[in-house]
Amino acid sequence: MILATDVYYFNNQAKAVGVTFESYDNNTISSISSAIIDNVEDYEPGSFYKRELPCIIELFLKIDLSQINAIIIDGYVFLDDNRKEGLGAYLYHYLQKKVPIIGVAKTSFHDNKKNVVEVFRGKSKKPLFVTSIGIDLDLASSNIKSMYGENRFPDLLKLLDQETKNITKSLN
């Protein structure tokens, strides 16, 4: 099972959502879980993980992680060519290096060319920026490229983004 996560911030709160699915090339969702987190840390440039990681950890309380083979995050594993750790690396360590992490970002990060694969999907001229830990970077980028959907952003990740931003929907 693969888990994709995203977090949306509003007021002093966050909504973390996780979508599970069986394979990268399938568009069938196994489950959607969500959590509302109060008193979220302020954003700190270069230390985004301090804000996002606690939200994802709160979401994990609603997910059986023993069934998860990989986690996709909205963000980076490494922030630069010197492997400065980003959210994905911190999450990997939190999970005691047991679950591979794939970071998918929409924008490039300064000084980060060695640890990133640009993935072009569909007819888009703009890439997604894929990083990984616990899984070969080429395999991780191939997995993201193979995800269902014809556009730059895979359909399941687009659905996840929409679900995260829907703060009025009842939570499970």
Image (cartoon, rainbow, N blue to C red):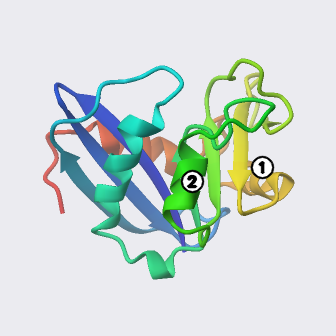
Please give the name of the residue rendered at 62% of the width and 38% of the height, measured from the top-left corner.
76
State the SS at label 2.
Answer: strand
Residue 26 figure quarter: bottom right
Counting residues from the start of the chain, the first of labels 2 and 1 encountered is: 2
The residue that disc 2 covers is: 72
Quadrant of the frame with the C terminus: bottom left
Checking the image for residue 123, the label placed there is none
Q: What residue type is labelled 2?
A: Ile
Q: Is residue 101 above or below residue 113?
A: below
Q: What residue type is labelled 1?
A: Ser
Q: Is residue 106 above or below residue 52?
A: above
State the SS at label 1.
Answer: helix
Residue 44 figure quarter: top left
Total labels: the figure holds 2
Tell which of 127 and 69 is nearer to you. Answer: 69
Query: Where residue 79 sits in the image (x, y, percent)?
Result: 67, 32
- Dot 1 alpha-carbon crowd within 10 angstroms: few under 14, some 14 to 19, many 20 or more: many
Quadrant of the frame with the N terminus: bottom right
Marks 2,1: beta carbons within 8 A:
no
- Dot 2 alpha-carbon crowd within 10 angstroms: few under 14, some 14 to 19, many 20 or more: many
The residue that disc 1 covers is: 141
Query: Where residue 71 sits in the image (x, y, percent)?
Result: 55, 60
Please give the name of the residue rendered at 30% of the width and 62% of the height, measured from the top-left corner.
33
Is residue 11 among what the camera can see? yes
Please give the name of the residue rendered at 19% of the width and 39% of the height, measured from the top-left corner.
167
Query: Where residue 47 sits in the image (x, y, percent)?
Result: 49, 30
Please give the name of the residue rendered at 54% of the width and 24% of the height, measured from the top-left corner.
46
| Residue 68 relative to residue 138: left or right | left
